[in-house]
Image (cartoon, rainbow, N blue to C red):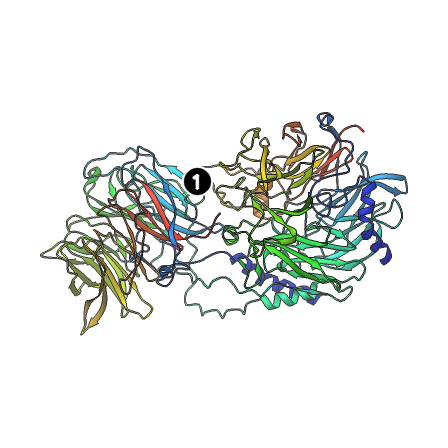
Amino acid sequence: MRRCLIAAGLILAIARVGAVDYLTAGADPQRTGWVKGEKVFTPANVSRMKLLWKKKLPSTPREMHNLFPPLVTERVTTARGEREIVVVPGVSDDLFGLDAATGEMFWARHFDSASDPANGVPPGTLCPGGQTAIPVIAPGRASGDYIAHAVSWDGRLRHINVADGSDAAPAEKFAPPNGKPYALNLVNGVIYTTLAQGCGGWPNAFLSYDLATKKSSAFLPQGGGLWGRRGPAIDADGRVYMGTGDNPYFSDRKNLGNAIVGVKIDANSQLQYDGHYAPSNANWMFKRDLDMNVSPMAFDYRGRKFLLASSKECRVWLLDRDQLGGDDHRTPLYRTPLICNDDAMLDASGVWGSMAAWEDANGTAWVLVPFWGAVSKTFHAPIEYGRPVRGGVAAFKLEQQNGAWTLTPAWLSRDMDMAEEVLVAGGIVFAYGSGEDTRQQGIERAFDEPAPAIRTTAKVSVQSVRRISSSTHATLYALDAQTGKELWSSGEQITSFNHFSGLTVANGRVYVPTYDGYIYCFGVTR
Amino acid sequence: MKRALTVVFLVSLAVAVSYAQVGKITQQDWVTSRADAQRTSWIRSDAFISPESMQKPGFALRWKATLADRSAPRSALAEGVVFGNLGFGSKPVSFITSRANRVFAVDNDTGVVFWQRELEGSIIRTNVCPGGATSAATRPATLVPVIPSWRGLPERGAYSSAVSAPGEGVLPYLLERQAAARAPAPTPAPASAPPAPPLPQVVYALSSDGILHTLGLYSGKDMSRPLPFLPPNARSSDLIAIGNVVYTTTTSGCGGVADGVWAMDLSSDAHDVKTWKSDAGSLVGRISFGTSGTVFVGSSNAIVALDPKELTVRNRFTLTGSTFVTSPVVFTIAEREIVAATAQDGSVLLLDAASLALLGRSTVGSRDPRGLATWEDRAGTRWLLATTLRSVLGFKATFVNGALTLETGWTSQPIGEPLPPIIVNGVAFLVSSDGPPILYALDAATGRELWTSGRTIVSPALRPALWAGIGQVQVATSDNVVYAFGFAMERD
């Protein structure tokens, strides 16, 4: 088994070359959101996209979480032959294996976590408990074999056969119980995640698990946060990156709050500090709770090793991975002006989803930034499809001007209700508004104002009840990646919102999971 | 495993608490006009402002914001009141009323108007009666100021990492780190009384039609039914709310309303309004409170102590040969509560708060005293700061043979028509008003100038309002611009 898992990690990159798979959050370990292998979608055909199927899964929500964006393996050898399998994670310790073509559920797997990993501590909107990390899939030893690695609520690492949901290997101790790990990543036989937001009372940490040695490691940056939706980004040199928050930045004390932190595993499977960047206004961001809450992207372009990061503050930092933040750790290659969040709000504004970076056929590099809330009064792009008030996507070109690297605004999308993760595939930007009520605080009702309708019977926290009740529905958009022009939208077809979830694109299909337990599959005919 | 999870649970609670508190600078808020119910104008401690820090570079204009439209009269803005930690994003907010019948909530970090609310009511302006919402807003106040101690950010060790034995997972290491980070449990003080219920998170404002509004801090919405409190178009002084009772005074006969003290119990269903109509001449400014709840009001020739519930007279001190020109200020020295006010003849009268017996009268060296503030230094010396036409004076209050005297401690450099000072953690701030206003920061124990705003304020003079926030001082000028000075936390 051990040899099998090692092989899985080592051949991941090789296997990707020939398959159009979506094996990890954000399409690749670098978290670029660029689905390079996509061959079906084109700007010309996406306007004919339609709902192919939707499937209600037996997943029980916890607080506002339910389903996470699925992973897709195109050619899985199953008992019924070769199938394209969609692996959908559910927060209540579930994995579901669906037929990508029809939505038929091939298998369902419920993890046997301890009866109550939370030990009686009630969940909340922020810390729902359950399975919170999007798994990662690696090819197995034989062609057509795939193994999904997942972290269950009890913190154990699971190894699941994608073909049938069975255990490929016994569960192993890894993370603490009832924490909040984010999306798993897998490079060179090592699984990485970040343990985030103090959930379960655990320190925020980078975690790793070496599949060969079964050694786990934790790196505590002494900064909170670590809650980038796609989990950590990992570059080709094995450097692992994530943003922190909720703690001040004191370089002399080695407290890396509100910073981008890089770590790397050593020969003994231990995570070690590798570098960091703290914005010049890190402590302002700490004071206003403007966490570095976005998974960074490791993006290589014209021989440069870039890292792109963002936060609730709503700007993008362009960094050099070989000199993260320069000698003083505070000097980026470039920093955009504010894209949104003029009022420095901690909720309902800023970048909360996941960005994308890609290079077009002409060699132009693009960076896409989805954001919540109104676009900044001072941010403008040459092409604008309105001035978003609920959210939108801003596109930049990564280019050199007078010898210096910069991010030049290119287009600004239409308004989207809480724009979340973006993915790029086939020259199309897939974006969506989650429709979620993202307000966390300050909801006041005048003495003569009727109480809002409660539209959930879920036994959840007061905040979750309010937000579930006042959320609307997600909307998927397909935009021309060159111009931002809307090519297609799902309109009213999706009837529920989602919270801290995302999108998946593979092989001419787009998957959107929602809070009500449905997974929607939109696509074009292949 | 069960034992491990139990440990996890207990540690989780401790860590969750510490996480929740991180980032919040908890210190005394400027909750009502002149800071507190005693109207001392004194913020006891501040995480940023001190005589030491003010001698270093960094204190500067952070932002300015215009808060009124063109229809607003000059000097429309009242002194703001502050909520230092709105929400868990630690947003400090000033709530500022405008005589244009508006209330503004301004982000103290950025100057951005968080919300504004227009109140109803016609506005009748005369030479004597400014009209509109004449009173500053107030947050609920306490008889003894709530002064949380700011202990700074929790100490954290340096970043660290560990690797487990094969198959062990990271749990043992994380448990070890949790234990190391856990602060020793403080020894709880013996409870002498049940804890006071939390104060409502609202701000009170009075519109020109005499209606009291209870506004939500986040939205400015009416959280309770607006209640008639004063007759329309009265000129009310700075509102204050103690317990469930809201108080104000009326002056100048505006709206045909006699000078008096007004109180309304918000906890009673009837919302009865009590009134004490002045029989001691024109009232001078705002009321203040003793720590036992007694209401002190100054008139031209008397200081009157009123019962806080019924507004009946408890005691009275009558001044002869001069008239009072400042509202009473209350402080404690040698365990005695004192009421101080200045008179037109340049004297400061010091009265026993319990009996209003005269304990001392000291001349401050001017026949035109303008304002009074008080603070106590770390050595326990009680200071009174008085402004005259040309300077600020610091007096030490001491008992000598049973008499309370004021000994001149310092006299500031010449300052043109300084307005009443405020004191923040040992630093006295005041604004000159004989030209373009200049904000001065003086060492409140020596009078030494620590900093000035120079020509930063370009607005005309005329009665600027001054109040403090966390690490910051705001000045509202007569052209309805708020200038905020503080130590910049780099935003950009």
Locate the C terminus of chain A and report the quarter of the image it occupies: top right
User: Farthest front residue?
Assistant: A402
User: Farthest left residue?
Assistant: B321
Q: How many labels were placed on the picture?
A: 1
Q: Residue B198: x and y, percent?
A: 43, 55
Which sits in the foreground, B117 or A61?
A: B117
Element under disc 1: loop
Confirm whether residue A436 shows in the render. no
Relative to residue B473, is residue B73 depicted above or below?
above
Q: Quadrant of residue A434?
A: top right
- Residue bearing mark 1: A447
Which sits in the foreground, B359 or A225?
A: A225
Which sits in the foreground, A114 or A157?
A: A157
Q: Residue A63: x and y, percent?
A: 63, 47
Q: Residue B370: x and y, percent?
A: 20, 53
Locate the N terminus of chain A and report the quarter of the image it occupies: bottom right
Confirm whether residue A395 shows in the render. yes
Q: Residue at x 63, y 66 (%)?
A: B177
Kindly identify which chain the residue marked by label 1 belongs to. A
Looking at the image, residue A411 sits to the left or right of residue A428; the answer is left
Q: Residue B259: x and y, percent?
A: 19, 45
What amino acid type should be assigned to the residue bearing mark 1?
Answer: Phe
